[in-house]
Image (tube, helix red, strand yellow):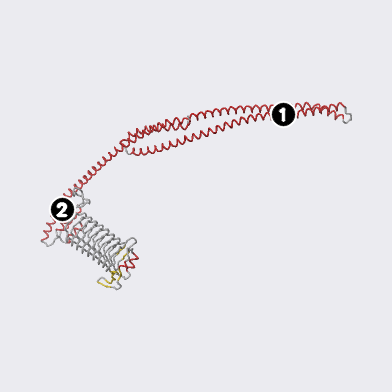
């Protein structure tokens, strides 16, 4: 009803507008006629005036001429005077009549023009009223258009939300290739509906008067489209379920592939192990030659090997490569060479002279040797190369390992008691729980080694490189570390009673909670940066080189607690076999 009423008002405005246009045309035509009549009237007046002046001026001129002719003779006739008087009277009479006529004519014109202007004013007032009505109708129409624009903006918001949902659906569709073609059909149908809606919107912009009817059609299309989206969502849920099922199957397949790969790797390693086993027969033959040659040299009272046989031993040791083998139905974590360990044990048990061993170890390579739990007590292993060898639980007590290369070995819980490791390289070695009691390790290299819980009682580490070594909870009772480099080393919670750290370097060393009773720190260079704590160290009986040693320590260290409140330095200097010192004691 409201829309039909608006349409009737628009039709009425159009009729009024057409009527105003027709009346304007009539007024214009009347103005043109008035202008034509006014111009023709002016021309007639001008022509009549000229004719009258010409006509009435001839007699008056003749009368004046005769008067002027008669004046010199002073014989002016009565006829001349009468004629002149008559012409003057007549002229004045004509001038008055003309003046009256001239005076009356503008008044008449003004009266006629006033009537025309009044009529035109009435027409303009009517036209103004019509224009005001038309303006009101236009304002009402604009308000209706604004209302329609609000509806359109709301529809656009719905379209934006709908498009965002479609984008999310497209992301899901891109990950579901197996069911993509079915969904394309649905999306094509949806695109057709959207295209229909776009066409309706174009028609709506060009024909606002038809928008109300199009809204109903559009609403129906919305409902149809929502139904299509609901169907599409159901299909997506079904696709998601199928995708999850497929992912589970793929994961199962991946597990099978992993197991298959593991089996292949095991098979490859086992093939390599079989190949090593075939090489082992050569080792048996070579060891038989060693026994035979040693038995032959026994008569000469020497246990040496010939250079040729030593060369074969060196060549055989180089041919053994590390590999992984099955242990408890799985491959071991780190490649190892049992053949190298077997060869080394056989050579050690041969009891040949040290000269032959030295030549063999200089030429051979026993890296990655498997020596877990082996007995190598009193073995002569100078200059041997045992990088990354497995020495876990091996017994190397009283063994000679001078200048041995033991980098990255696994020496957990191994026994090195009373062994000699002077100059040996134990960098990055795992020596947790090992026993180095009374071991000689002078100038040895243990940088980055792990010695947590290791027994180093009375071990000799003078001049050793111990940078960033982890001695946490280790037993270093009476250990010798004179001149050792302990930069960045962790000595927290260790037992350092009566340890000798004279002239050692303790830069960034962690001594927190350590037992330093009786330790000798004379000449030691302690440089601790901020952030490293000496948390309540026990310094009872420690030996230092100056009575103001606490002052220099506090300047270079951050100490949790007031050491001066617990300990004091005996001002009386003492002396022992190692030199003069000042003793720290409890207050």
Q: Secondary structure at mark 2?
A: helix
How far from the left and from the top, in percent, is residue 276?
Answer: 18, 50
Q: Position of residue 304 (x, y in %)?
A: 15, 60
Above or below — where is 441 with respect to 15?
below
Residue, far left = 299
* Drawn side of residue 119 relative to residue 520, left or right: right
Q: Which residue is mark 1?
A: 105
**Residue at the outermost bottom position:** 572
Which x, y percent locates residue 441?
23, 63
Q: Residue at x 63, y 27 (%)?
A: 30
Q: Nearer the viewer, residue 313 or 194?
A: 194
- Count of marks placed on residues: 2
Sort mark 2 into few (<14), some (14-19) or many (20+) by Cα contacts within 10 Å.
many
Q: Which label is found at residue 283?
A: 2
Name the one closer to the observer, 232 or 459: 232
Q: Which of the 4 quarters of the picture holds residue 249?
A: top left
Q: Say which of 159 and 184 sits in front.
A: 159
Badge 1 element: helix
Which residue occupies 79% across, 28% down? 93
Q: Is residue 270 above or below residue 90?
A: below
Q: Earlier in the sequence, mark 2 or mark 1?
A: 1
Dot 1: few (<14), some (14–19), or many (≥20) neighbours within 10 Å? few
Residue 499 appears at what percent x and percent y?
25, 66
**Which numbered dot is residue 171?**
none
In terms of depth relative to the viewer, which is nearer, 20 or 273?
A: 20
Marks 2 and 1 close (CB-CB < 8 Å): no
- The C terminus sits in image quarter: bottom left
Quarter location, residue 49: top right
Mark 2 or 1: the one toward you: 1
Query: In the drawing, does residue 255 fall left or right of residue 123?
Result: left
Left or right, 83 with reference to 428: right
Q: CA distance from mark 2 to mark 1?
A: 154 Å
């Amino acid at each position: 009803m409201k829309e039909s009423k608006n349409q009737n008002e628009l039709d009425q405005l159009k009729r009024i507008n057409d009527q105003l246009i027709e009346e304007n045309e009539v007024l214009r035509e009347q103005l043109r006629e008035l202008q034509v009549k006014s111009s023709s009237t002016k021309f007639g007046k001008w022509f009549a005036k000229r004719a009258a002046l010409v006509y009435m001026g001839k007699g008056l001129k003749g009368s004046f001429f005769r008067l002027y002719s008669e004046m010199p003779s002073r014989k002016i006739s009565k006829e001349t005077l009468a004629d002149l008087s008559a012409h003057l009277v007549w002229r004045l009479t004509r001038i008055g009549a003309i003046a009256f006529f001239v005076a009356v004519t503008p008044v008449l014109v003004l009266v006629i023009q006033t009537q025309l202007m009044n009529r035109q004013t009435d027409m303009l007032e009517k036209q103004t009223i019509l224009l005001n009505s038309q303006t009101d109708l236009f304002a009402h129409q604009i308000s209706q258009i604004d209302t329609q624009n609000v509806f359109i903006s709301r529809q656009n918001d719905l379209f934006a939300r709908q498009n965002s949902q479609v984008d999310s659906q497209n992301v899901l569709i891109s990950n579901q290739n197996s069911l993509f073609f079915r969904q394309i059909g649905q999306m094509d149908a949806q695109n057709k509906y959207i295209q229909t809606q776009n066409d309706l919107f174009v028609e709506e912009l060009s024909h606002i008067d038809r928008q109300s009817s199009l809204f109903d059609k559009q609403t129906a299309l919305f409902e149809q489209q929502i139904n299509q989206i609901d169907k599409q969502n159901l299909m997506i849920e079904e696709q998601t379920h199928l995708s999850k099922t497929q992912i589970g199957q793929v994961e199962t397949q991946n597990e099978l592939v992993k197991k298959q790969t593991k089996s292949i790797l095991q098979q490859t390693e086992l093939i390599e192990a079989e190949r090593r086993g075939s090489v082992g027969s050569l080792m048996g033959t070579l060891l038989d030659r060693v026994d035979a040659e040693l038995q032959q040299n026994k008569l000469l009272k020497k246990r040496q090997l010939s250079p040729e046989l030593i060369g074969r031993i060196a060549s055989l040791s180089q041919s053994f490569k590390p590999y992984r083998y099955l242990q408890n139905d799985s491959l071991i974590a780190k490649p190892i060479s049992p053949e190298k360990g077997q060869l080394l044990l056989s050579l050690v048990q041969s009891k040949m002279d040290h000269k032959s061993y030295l030549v063999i170890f200089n030429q051979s390579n026993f890296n990655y040797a498997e020596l877990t739990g082996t007995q190598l007590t009193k073995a002569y292993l100078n200059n041997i190369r045992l990088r990354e060898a497995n020495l876990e639980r091996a017994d190397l007590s009283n063994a000679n390992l001078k200048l041995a290369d033991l980098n990255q070995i696994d020496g957990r819980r191994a026994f090195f008691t009373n062994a000699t490791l002077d100059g040996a390289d134990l960098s990055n070695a795992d020596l947790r729980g090992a026993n180095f009691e009374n071991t000689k390790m002078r100038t040895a290299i243990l940088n980055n080694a792990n010695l947590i819980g290791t027994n180093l009682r009375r071990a000799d580490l003078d001049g050793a490189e111990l940078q960033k070594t982890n001695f946490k909870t280790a037993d270093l009772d009476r250990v010798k570390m004179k001149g050792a480099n302990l930069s960045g080393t962790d000595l927290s919670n260790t037992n350092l009673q009566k340890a000798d750290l004279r002239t050692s370097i303790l830069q960034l060393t962690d001594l927190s909670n350590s037992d330093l009773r009786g330790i000798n720190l004379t000449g030691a260079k302690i440089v601790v940066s901020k952030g490293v704590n000496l948390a309540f160290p026990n310094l009872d009986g420690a030996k230092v080189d100056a009575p103001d040693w606490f002052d220099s320590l506090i300047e270079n260290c951050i100490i949790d607690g007031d050491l001066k409140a617990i300990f004091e330095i005996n001002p009386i200097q003492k002396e022992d076999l190692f030199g003069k010192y000042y003793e720290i004691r409890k207050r």
